Image (cartoon, rainbow, N blue to C red):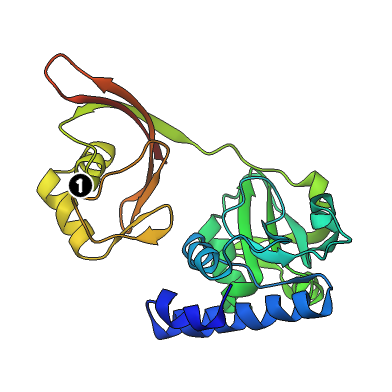
């Protein structure tokens, strides 16, 4: 855990600024031996933070529920156990309820929040269900949101804070795709998952529109591991769910989940 590693890890000026902020926050908690947490981080930001902090004792990632995508880094001093995370992390879950005949989307809620002047870094995951949406914000902005957030898109909502134990996590809708591939190259997996030509898949990658587990990738020949999630801007997201081995013709049998 060395501050001088920031310049080695950061790929952009924005990365440097973010990593410096994270470093100052976590270092302060360590030196004072008090719990602290950062803003919400994307999957990519979590990955570059992991390179900076390594296996720092007492440092955890927490987004309010199991399998959260956007998470805070939370430092717990030695007098607190991991079980204290839900009560220690400075985040709140708010539930927006609305008429079930309406169907506001994740984009509607995110757009309404950022349109109200709320920075993306203080917003965690947004979980849209039938008739309700649970979303996470930092405790600092929760009172403002509770007082001022009245609608998402054209849908009017009623807002209340709920305990983390009551969070409703929707089951993702996926379409299962079974196929055989010549290899587990990124362009080959994208081609099968989104039903596009391999050359088109390679163009998406080279254009910088693809990420693997949240990390940008511009190499079409990158080999994908089982369980990896691939997102392509403009197409959506897939997961290489299973790699079943080779067929008699030497191709690789796979199962891919496409999120719909």
Sort mark 1 into few (<14), some (14-19) or many (20+) by Cα contacts within 10 Å: many
> Viewed as shown, does residue 200 lie left or right of 114?
left
- The residue depicted at 81 percent of the width and 45 percent of the height is 165
Residue 36 percent location from the top left of the image: 77, 72
Residue 134 percent location from the top left of the image: 70, 53
- The residue depicted at 66 percent of the width and 65 percent of the height is 73
Residue 116 in view (yes/no): no
Foreground pick, 69 / 250: 250
Decide: is 84 above or below 248: below
Decide: is 111 above or below 127: below
Foreground pick, 45 / 118: 45
Residue 147 percent location from the top left of the image: 80, 74
| Image quarter in which the C terminus is found | top left
Residue where numbered disc 1 is placed? 187
Residue 167 percent location from the top left of the image: 75, 47
> Viewed as shown, does residue 143 lie left or right of 46?
right
> Viewed as shown, does residue 11 lie left or right of 152?
left
Decide: is 21 above or below 108: below
């Amino acid at each position: 855990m060395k501050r001088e590693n920031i310049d080695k890890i950061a790929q952009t000026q924005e990365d440097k600024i973010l990593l410096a902020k994270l470093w100052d926050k976590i270092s302060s908690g360590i030196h004072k031996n008090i719990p602290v947490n950062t803003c919400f981080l994307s999957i990519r930001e979590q990955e570059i933070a992991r390179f900076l902090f390594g296996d720092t004792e007492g440092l955890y990632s927490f987004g309010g529920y199991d399998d959260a995508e956007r998470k805070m880094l939370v430092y717990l001093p030695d007098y607190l156990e991991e079980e204290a995370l839900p009560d220690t992390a400075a985040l709140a879950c708010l539930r927006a309820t609305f008429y079930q005949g309406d169907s506001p989307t994740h984009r509607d809620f995110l757009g309404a929040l950022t349109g109200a002047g709320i920075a993306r870094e203080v917003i965690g995951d947004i979980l849209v269900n039938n008739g309700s949406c649970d979303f996470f914000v930092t405790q600092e902005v929760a009172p403002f949101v509770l007082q001022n957030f009245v609608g998402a898109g054209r849908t009017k909502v009623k807002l209340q804070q709920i305990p983390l134990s009551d969070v409703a996590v929707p089951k993702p809708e996926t379409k299962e795709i079974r196929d055989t591939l010549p290899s587990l190259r990124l362009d080959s997996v994208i081609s099968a998952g989104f039903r596009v030509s391999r050359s088109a898949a390679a163009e998406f990658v080279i254009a910088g529109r693809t990420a693997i587990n949240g990390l940008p990738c511009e190499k079409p020949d990158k080999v994908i591991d089982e369980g990896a999630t691939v997102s392509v801007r403009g197409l959506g997201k897939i997961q290489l769910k299973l790699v079943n081995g080779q067929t008699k013709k030497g191709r690789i049998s796979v199962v891919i989940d496409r999120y719909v």
